[in-house]
Image (cartoon, grey):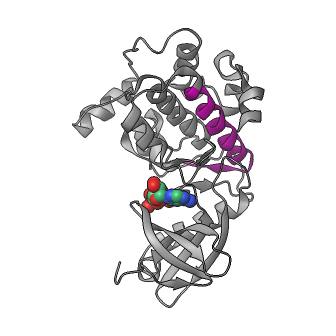
Amino acid sequence: MAGSTKGAKVGPYILTDTLGVGAFGKVKRGRHTQTGAEVAVKIMDKGDIAANEFGANVKREIFIMRTLHHRNIVNLHEVLTSKTKLYMVMDLVRGGELFEKIEKEGELDEQTARRFFQQLVDGLVHCHEKGVCHRDLKPENLLIDENSVLKITDFGVSSMRDASASGADLLQTSCGTPYYVAPEVLFANKRGGYDGYKADAWSCGVILFLLLSGELPFMNEDMNKLYDEIKSAKIKWPKEIKGDSKALCQKLLERDPSKRLSLQEVRSQKWFVVDYEKNLAEL
Ligand code: ADP
Ligand code: MG
């Protein structure tokens, strides 16, 4: 990205510090010059957008974020442009990434893990009901606000069901981050498409495993070995995952997507329903 954007004025906002850097964009804090209200601004280079398929992805990301309205999903306020850049103005989520929390604190206690997981599933069920598959679920894309509300972000590689398409809605492109990706996504090119909803459900299984144990279910420095581990879906269960949490995790890390739970189904699972109303009311 050419030039510095720090202190730059974007519409009514002044950009200040960098909140995060991902594969596709930099995210900065923005302060409204009149009201002082703060937002997060994802900045993308128009040159990049014009040059390749990245442009279509950005348009889709914006379209998808405009479709979704849920308290567990980061809200997109507006899109601004300058000569060279495009700015997505979003809710500022102040508590950092769930990833940082686990990195710092290790595994979470069961109640805390459940509270985050309930919110993750609630947000994703909303996405799925709107025909959106996230496709890059991982703790770096799950933000926590000052009231411990979880907010899903980064719809940069998400897909939206085409209302005009007929028949099964199978995705072809494999994307996502290796540790969280479902086995059928790795097989996708050979076997035709995969169901993006069930692929999201798998990633939630990996996240649940991580929340409860502080470890990833599939971990290998060597990518080929990692892919083999995921494809085999063989798991060593740590002692923290047992009873009802293990039963749920197992039904999400089910190799066969047709047997795997959907996220709607997760909502009636024994481990999930504990304290659901109470947790929601406390947020
Ligand atoms: P990329 O597509 O490049 O991964 P993301 O949308 O995931 O971009 O943003 C990169 C990082 O910026 C996130 O992992 C997070 O740390 C930070 N970030 C993104 N959106 C927000 C937000 N609304 N509030 C606070 N921090 C954010
Ligand atoms: Mg990201």
Q: Main secondary structure of the magenta part?
A: helix
**Where does the image place residue 242, in percent across and percent down from the top left?**
50, 10
Side (left or right) of 130 relative to 256: right
In the picture as drawn, the residue positioned furthest to the left comes out as 222
Judge by depth and name the residue closer to the eye, 30 or 43: 30
Q: Is residue 45 visible?
A: yes
Judge by depth and name the residue closer to the eye, 18 or 259: 18
Q: Is residue 60 visible?
A: no
**Where does the image place residue 80, in percent across and percent down from the top left?**
60, 80
Does 10 sit above or below residue 37? below
The N terminus sits in image quarter: bottom left
Q: Is residue 197 magenta?
A: no
Q: Which residues are magenta?
A: 112-135
User: Residue sitting at 49 percent across and 33 percent down?
Assistant: 207
Residue 22 placement: quadrant: bottom left
**Where does the image place residue 260, in percent across and percent down from the top left?**
59, 25
Q: Is residue 127 magenta?
A: yes
Does 269 sit above or below residue 82? above
